[in-house]
Image (cartoon, rainbow, N blue to C red):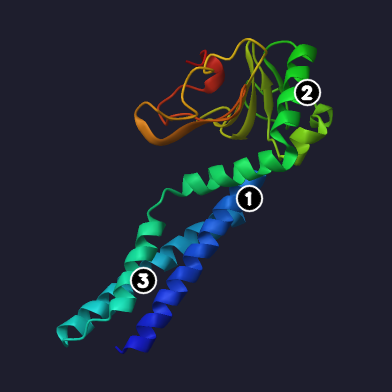
Amino acid sequence: MKKQPLLFLVFTIGFLLATEITLHIIYGYYASGYVLLLLLMGVISVVRYILILTCIGGIAWLASKKHFEKVVVFSLIALISIGIVPKVHFETLGSLISLFKANPQHVLNDARLLADKYPEMTCIGYENQRFPCNEPVSRNNLPPSFKSMHAVNVLILNDYVLIEKFGLQGVFRGFVIFRNDSNIWIDEQAITHQKGCFTCLRVRIINGLYWYQAGPNDPPIFTSPLQ
């Protein structure tokens, strides 16, 4: 195996990695559960790992022939390092992009208006889901800012509003908006990790509006108060 085929492999790995990251950002932006999108991300990931193993084999073969291709080795190391970044962070980036497109202050204000309009445990979203969205209010009642950010379901609770991107009934990832004077996180750091989950972040966007990712062992977010 010569240097040129290895460089082509490295370029292909880089292209696949860039494509995979882009798809995860899109997935987070639209909060899309389309099976084809998930399948495509999985296939790209598998092909990328196969090419990485092939490239490592080629580098080892060249090394046995007393050839050391620094450009190939260091480029591959860089791509592998980027590739091990948890993809959930790119989905979070996509969700944050959708929020800023809708304007965080508008989303905050609209969420508080919804909280004043509807009683506790009101779900606004898609039909035919599990509790608490088994009898939702129509999505037509969502303000334009929520539709612009591609909110999935919105749940009104006593002290805050949950805007789902993923997993309202399971492992929640989305936005938490506190009512006025109810922000229990106001004095905490802008970015914190959830206990027992290094990749689970809580991020303050503006005062009263947070990105929140629950831990994998946490109960559904609507079943117990936030801490």
Amino acid at pointer 1:
Tyr
Q: Nearer the viewer, residue 55 or 37?
A: 55
Amino acid at pointer 2:
Val
Position of 157 compared to 172: left or right? Answer: right
Q: Earlier in the sequence, mark 2 or mark 1?
A: 1
Amino acid at pointer 3:
Ser
Within 10 Å of the Cα at label 2, are there few (<14), some (14-19), or many (20+) other Cα atoms?
Answer: some
Q: Where in the figure is residue 218, as x and y percent of width and height?
A: 43, 24
Q: Nearer the viewer, residue 32 or 163?
A: 163
Q: Nearer the viewer, residue 118 or 200?
A: 200
Question: Where 140 sits versus 34, above or below?
Answer: above
Residue on which disc 2 sits: 137
Residue on which disc 3 sits: 75
Residue at (44% x, 34% y) in the render:
200
Question: Alpha carbon of mark 3 to alpha carbon of mark 1: how far?
Answer: 33 Å
Question: Alpha carbon of mark 3 to alpha carbon of mark 2: how far?
Answer: 52 Å
Question: Alpha carbon of mark 2 to alpha carbon of mark 1: how far?
Answer: 23 Å
